[in-house]
């Protein structure tokens, strides 16, 4: 019997995880199946689906919206990344215990450094948005050696609170948070990350042209949307290096796969297959 894995979310039909993990399993010769589970909109759906999957011998799960917080709460043991992100995106079931991880930020860092060729050591980073994606990115960016991170969010108080909360865990990396104006004040950044959901609504968050340092990388975490308003804005500001979040998606999947199976799949082919040109 092949080992069982799944992704759970609501809605879930759009998820690329079954395709990605199916390709990883094929390439690494792992005897496993991977399905999509809709946890439903009602209360308790996630808990019931989790219990049923574990009872049926499931070995691990990816977790997507809106269950990442519930997934962390359901865990017997969680990594520091998951605890500080306040959310889990991968679970492993072992001897009746639920272990939780959050690989979103690790996947982001791996995409930037390994696939896009931008070493993060000493870099100045502007993070637009203060939701779950920003929260999950902060610690891995600091661990990779970013020198300074500024969080600029539509709702300033959320960015300020997040910076205050995570600052003690960021080592040598300084972190500050504020409203959209925090992206200005004549500062320039080597990496400008759009971690807002503005692209999903066809909008761009406020960011001044001067925020993009010469040679900067503009990265929109959303994927499959082509040249988003944020990436257009970056290009208009003279930024030549742009990327969307497809690599983050594939790399966080590879981390989960390695955590479950003990073998890290090569991501190049899967990445090529899922990439939508930025035009
Ligand atoms: P979230 O927790 O809902 O946070 C959304 C953030 O976007 C908030 O800071 C919100 O500001 C801001 N925002 C929303 N609409 C805006 C607008 N029109 N202008 C300016 N700011 C706006 O969402 P999330 O989970 O962090 O996800 C953020 C993005 O990352 C999404 O596009 C998601 O698809 C992407 N993502 C990608 C991956 C990947 O693997 N590539 C993984 C995770 C997330 P307020 O605080 O003011 O409401």
Image (spheres, rainbow, N blue to C red):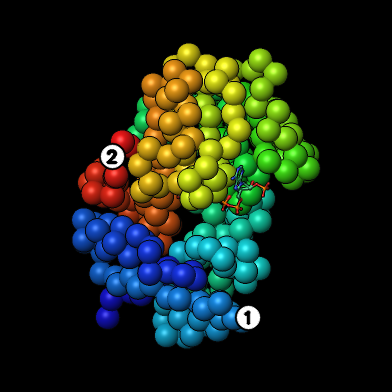
What element does badge 1 sit on? loop
Task: Identify which residue, 33 or 151, lies in the foreground.
Answer: 151
- In this image, 104 relative to 43: left or right? left
Towards the viewer: 79 or 112: 112
Residue 161 position (above or below residue 51): above
Residues 49 and 192: in front is 192
* Residue 103 in view: yes
Residue density around tag 2, few if under 14, some if 14–19, many if 20 or more, within 10 Å: few
Among the two numbered marks 1 and 2 on one chain, the one whose residue lies closer to the N terminus: 1
Which corner quadrant holds the C terminus?
top left
- Residue receiving disc 2: 277
Task: Tell me the residue that label 1 is attached to.
Answer: 43
Residue at left 56%, top 73%? Answer: 97
Image position of 262 with respect to 52: above or below: above
Residue 216 in the image, given as x and y percentages of width and height: 47, 21
Q: Quadrant of residue 154?
A: top right
Q: Position of residue 45 (x, y in %)?
A: 56, 81
Relative to 70, say whether 131 is above or below.
above
Determine whether, in the image, residue 16 is placed left or right of residue 202: left
Side (left or right) of 76 relative to 17 = right
Q: Position of residue 267 (x, y in %)?
A: 29, 46
Residue beneath the point at 70% across and 28% down: 181
Q: Quadrant of the N terminus?
A: bottom left
Task: Identify the secondary structure beneath mark 2.
Answer: loop
From the image, state whether disc 1 or disc 2 is nearer to you: 2
| Image location of residue 139, percent across then percent down | 61, 40
The image quarter in which residue 46 lies? bottom right
Label 1 and label 2: CA atoms lie apart by: 39 Å
Q: Is residue 140 visible?
A: no
């Amino acid at each position: 019997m092949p080992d069982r894995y799944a992704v759970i979310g609501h809605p879930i039909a759009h998820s690329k995880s079954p395709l990605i993990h199916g390709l990883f399993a094929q390439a690494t010769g792992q005897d496993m199946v991977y399905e999509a589970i809709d946890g439903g909109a009602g209360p308790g759906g996630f808990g019931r689906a989790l219990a049923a999957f574990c009872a049926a011998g499931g070995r691990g799960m990816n977790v997507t919206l809106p269950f990442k917080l519930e997934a962390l709460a359901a865990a017997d043991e969680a990594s520091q990344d998951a605890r500080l992100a306040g959310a889990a995106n991968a679970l492993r079931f072992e001897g009746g215990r639920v272990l939780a991880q959050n690989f979103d930020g690790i996947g982001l860092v791996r995409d930037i450094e390994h696939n896009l060729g931008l070493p993060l050591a000493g870099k100045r980073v502007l993070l637009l948005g203060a939701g779950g994606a920003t929260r999950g990115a902060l610690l891995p960016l600091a661990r990779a050696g970013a020198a300074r991170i500024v969080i600029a969010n539509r709702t300033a108080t959320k960015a300020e609170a997040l910076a205050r909360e995570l600052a003690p865990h960021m080592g040598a990396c300084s972190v500050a948070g504020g409203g959209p104006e925090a992206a200005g004040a004549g500062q320039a950044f080597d990496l400008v990350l759009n971690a807002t959901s503005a692209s999903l609504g066809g909008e761009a968050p406020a960011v001044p042209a001067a925020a993009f340092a010469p040679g900067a990388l503009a990265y929109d975490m959303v994927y499959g949307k082509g040249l988003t308003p944020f990436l257009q804005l970056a290009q208009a500001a003279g930024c030549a290096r742009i990327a969307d979040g497809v690599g983050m998606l594939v790399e966080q999947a590879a981390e989960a796969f390695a955590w479950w199976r003990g073998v890290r799949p090569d991501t190049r082919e899967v990445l090529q297959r899922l990439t939508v040109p930025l035009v």
